[in-house]
Image: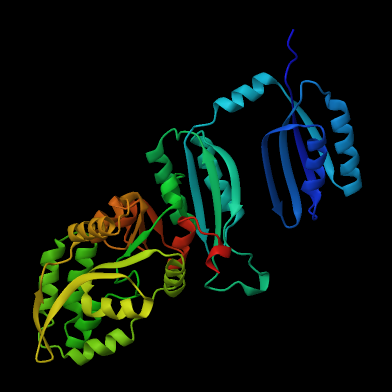
Amino acid sequence: MNKQHEIILLNIYGNDKPGLTSSLTQILANYKVNILDIGQAVIHNNLDLGILFEVPTESESSPILKDLLFKGYELGIRVKFTPISEKEYNLWVTKQGKGRYIITLVGRIISAKHIAEVTGIVYKQQLNIDKITRVSGRIKLTERTKGTKACVELLVRGTPYNIVEMKSNFLTIAHDLGVDIAFQEDNIYRRTRRLVCFDMDSTLVQTEVIDELAYKAGVGDAVSKITESAMRGEIDFAESFKQRIALLKGLDEKIMIQIAENLPLTEGAERLFRTLKKYGFKTAILSGGFTYFGKYLQNKLDIDYVFANQLEIVNGKLTGNYLGDIVDGAKKAELLRNIAFKEDIHLEQTVAVGDGSNDLPMLNIAGLGIAFHAKPLVKKNAQHAISTTGLDVILYLMGFRERDIE
C-alpha cells in the first residue's frame, strides 16, 4: 500500500531579524523537504512567515518538527504546525487559474472604515483576498499634510458574483468616504504599460484655459456657460468649440503668453512626468484646448506628443477662427490609437487620463482609463476615477511602489 503524502503548514510569528528565514529553511533543506507554497510579510518589524511543505516519503515528520521547534525557541519566535490532508491540498490546487484582480485604495489617509467597507464588498462578491500590501511610503504622524497620500493594494482571486453591482458599490463608497477605489484585472498588460495620454485643461492644469482667455477678452460668463454645458455632455463639443473661440476675436497674443507662463500645474504632475520619463514611458497631451498652451507644457514637462486645437492668429490678434481639424472626443480616441500604432504599443498597454465627457472615448479604449477629478457623468462611465488626490497616484494604479517613484 502506497504511503500517504504528509503535508504540513508551518507558520512562524515574531520579531523579524536577519537570517531567520535562512535558519528555518536550512532545517527543511537538511531533510530534503519539498516546498509547495511559501509567503512572508513583515509589518512594523513583526514577521509572519508561512511555508507549506511535503515530507519526503522515506522520512518521518517528527524529527523535522522537533528541530523547527528548537530553532524557534532559540530565535525567540512562535512556531505552529498544521497537518494538511491530501484532499484539502488537492482542493486548494484546483483553485489556481481563477481570475485575479487588483483593488487599489487611494486617499489622503486610509482608515479602518475604508478597509472594512471594501473587504465587505469583496466578501459579498465571493472573492478571496490573497494578499494586502501598503504601496505608498510610510507616513510620519507629525508630517501629515494636505499633500499626504496613502495607498493600499488588495490582490483578490475568483469570479465576481455581479461585477456591475460591485463597481457601483465601490463608486458609492468612494463618494461617501472620500477615498478612490480602482478595480483592475491582474494581467500582464497591467505590468507593461508604455504610453500615457492626458487631457490638458482641468487635468494637467487646474484651469480651463479658454475660460482664462475669455475673462481677459471680457466674455468670461458667456464662454464659461458654454464650457460647462459641453463638459457635462449636454451639447456637441465641436459646436461649443466654435461658439467659444468666436467670442475671443480680437484678443492680443500677449495675453496668451501671460496665461501660459502662469498655468497652475495640477498636484503631482511634475512628479508623475519625472517618473514616467525615468522609466521610458511615452507621454502625450490629447486636448480639446489649444496647441499654444500644450506646447508650453510639452517643454516644461518633457512630453513626447501634443495634439490640440490651433487658434488662428493674424497680426498678433486672435481672429475667432481655428486651423485644421477640431480635436473632439472621437479625435482623441483616434490619436491615441495612432500614437500606439506608431510606437508599436498594444492598446492594452496604454493609459488615458481626463476629466470631461469628450475624454470618455479615449478613456474607454485605453488599457487603463482614469477619470481625474471628473464630472459625475464621466466618473460613472469611466473605468476608474481619482477624485481625492493628485496626478501622481496614477503611478500606484500602474503598479508602481513608492520606492520605485523616489
Q: Position of residue 282 (x, y in %)?
A: 35, 64
Q: Position of residue 170 (x, y in %)?
A: 45, 48
Residue at 41% over, 35% down? 162
Q: Is residue 179 visible?
A: no
Residue at 44% over, 69% down? 272
Residue at 51% over, 59% down? 400
Q: Position of residue 133 (x, y in %)?
A: 60, 52
Q: Is residue 49 visible?
A: yes
**Looking at the image, which is closer to me, 41 or 178?**
41
**Looking at the image, which is closer to me, 387 or 224?**
387
Q: Is residue 255 found left or right of 91 in the rendered image?
A: left
Quadrant where the N terminus lies? top right
Q: Is residue 264 found left or right of 159 in the rendered image?
A: left
Quadrant where the C terminus lies? bottom right
Which quarter of the picture shows residue 3?
top right
**Looking at the image, which is closer to me, 344 or 332?**
344
With respect to residue 47, does 284 lie above or below? below
With respect to residue 405, does 251 lie above or below? below
Q: Position of residue 17 (x, y in %)?
A: 80, 55
Residue at 89% over, 33% down? 66
Furthest residue in direction top, as rendered: 1
Q: How many marks?
A: 0
